[in-house]
Amino acid sequence: MLLARVQEMSSRTLSILLSLAALVAVAGPSTAARACEPPACFYDTGRWTTADLANADEIPTDGVLVVTGTRWGGGVAEAEFGAIEVKVERGGVSVAGTLEGLGLTEAFAWRPAEALVPGIHEVTLTIDNDGIDPGAPDGECGPATLEALFVIEVVDETSPAPAAPYLTIDATVVVDGSRDLDDYICCDGAFPYEVQGSCDLELSWDEGRCASLRVDAGLRGWFERVDDEPALLAGALMYQLIVDGVAQTRSLDGVLRHDAAAPFCALVEVKSLATGAVAATEERCYGQHLGGPLGALTCDPTAELADCSGEPYRCENVGGEWDPQQCSPWDGVVDPDAVDCGFGGPTTEGTTTGFESTGDESSGDESSGDASTGDASTGDASTGDASTGDASSSDGSSGTTDEDDDGRGCGCDAGTAELSSLAWLVLLGVPRRRRRPERVRPAPAELRRVDE
C-alpha cells in the first residue's frame, strides 16, 4: 500500500516537475549558493584588506589608539607586529609609542610612551602584507602594502572611568536536528534530500512532514550593549564575558555570544584600554529551570508525527536523498531513553534600557510535554514581574527559515535571574519542509541547483 501511494504521488507531480526542469536549468545559482560562493581570496593568509581607527575623533591625553580591520585569516594581530608600523606626529614632530596586542585577530592598539599633548595629531598606518605572507597574491588577498592616514584631536582631559553597560540579552534554546538521512521518519510524501544551505550541508523536503530521531539541544546567550560608550572612551573599551567565573569571549564592539550544553551564570566586564580600569554587570543565571534536557538527545517522534494523514515510513538513502522506491512503514518502536524534542519555552518580547523594561511573555511546551510559564521583567528590571500569554509551538511542517523574536533583559542592575527573566527563544535547527516550487530530482551524479 505504501509503495503504491508513493508511486501514485510521483506520477501526479511528474508532469509538473518536467515542465519546471527547463526553468531550473537556466534559473542561475540559488540564494544559498550565492551565500556560499568561494571567498575572493583562496588563501588562508594573515594579510590585511582594510584597516581603520576605532577611536572617536577626539581622545584624552592618556588615551590609546585602537586599530581594527579585516583579514583573510591568520592568528592574533600581535604575531605580525614586525610588518606593522604606526607613526604618530604632532606638528611634524614624531610621537613615541609602541604597538600592543589585544589577543584579537583583527585589532591591536598603539600606546604612547607618555601622556599626549593636546592638539591635532596625524596618524600613518602601514602594513606590509608581503612581509606577512609573500606567497598570497596581491589584489583580493590584500595589497602588497596597506597604508592609511588618519587625523585625531587630543583634548586636554583624562579618560573617565568606565561604567557597567546596559545590555540586551537573548537567552536562546537552540535545537539542531540530525544531518543524517537515516535519522528521519516521514509521512505524507516527504522524501528528504541533501542541499547546500548557508555554507553547510542541510536536509530538506518539498511536502509532508518529517521528524528527526536525534538532535543536539544547546543554550545560547547573546549579550549586546545598547547604550552609547562615553565619548572619550569610544572604540577603546574591551568587553569580556565571564561565564561561571571563567573568562570567555571578548570583543571591542560590545557584542558577545556564548554557546553551552548546560545552564550557566554570566556577567560582562568592560575594561578601559587606556587606563585598565574595569567595570562589570552583576552576574545573572540562565537556563536554571528548563523543562527539557540539553545535549545530544534521542527523540520520540510520536507527537511530531501525530498529525500525519498517512502512515509514517522510512526510505533508503541513495546518493544523498531518499529513494521513493525503497520505502517501508515505520515500525513504531521508540527508544526507551527517547524524549519529546519538540519543546519550547517562555518568550519575552521588549526592550530594556537602564531600569525601564517592557515585555510580553508567552509560554510554550517543554520537553516534558507540560506547559510552563515564568516571570519576565516588565516595568522595573529588578522585580521580575510579568504577564503570561498564548502558547507557542513548532512542528515538522514549518519552513526552514529560523525566526527570532528578540527578547530583552537588563544585565546590569538586576540580581540573579531565573530562566524566565529573559527572552527564551527556541531556534529549531531541525531540517524542515521548504515552501518552494517542486524540483526536478536529478541522478545522484548530477550537479544540483536548488531553487530557493
Image: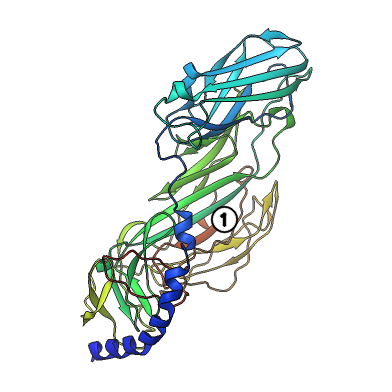
Q: SS for tag 1? A: helix
Query: Residue shown at 71%/22% (left/top)?
Result: 159
The residue where tag 1 is placed is: 421
Which percent across, then down, holds residue 359?
65, 61
Q: Quadrant of the N terminus?
A: bottom left
| Front one among 272 and 389 | 272
Which percent across, then down, holds residue 446?
30, 66
Describe residue 86's horizontal placement relative to residue 119 as left or right: left
Which percent across, then down, holds residue 348?
59, 61
Total number of numbered discs in the rendering: 1
Describe residue 402's horizontal placement relative to residue 262 as left or right: right
Question: For residue 347, which quarter of the picture?
Answer: bottom right
Q: Is residue 429 visible?
A: yes
Q: What residue type is disc 1 on? A: Ser
Question: For residue 305, which quarter of the picture?
Answer: bottom left
* Neighbours of disc 1 within 10 Å: few (<14), some (14-19), many (20+): many
Which percent across, then down, holds residue 206?
40, 76
Colour scheme used in the picture? rainbow
Question: For residue 366, which quarter of the picture?
Answer: bottom left
Query: Residue shown at 49%/19% (left/top)?
Result: 83
Query: Residue shown at 39%/84% (left/top)?
Result: 307
| Front one among 63 and 439 | 439
Q: Is residue 397 visible?
A: no
| Front one among 229 and 38 | 38
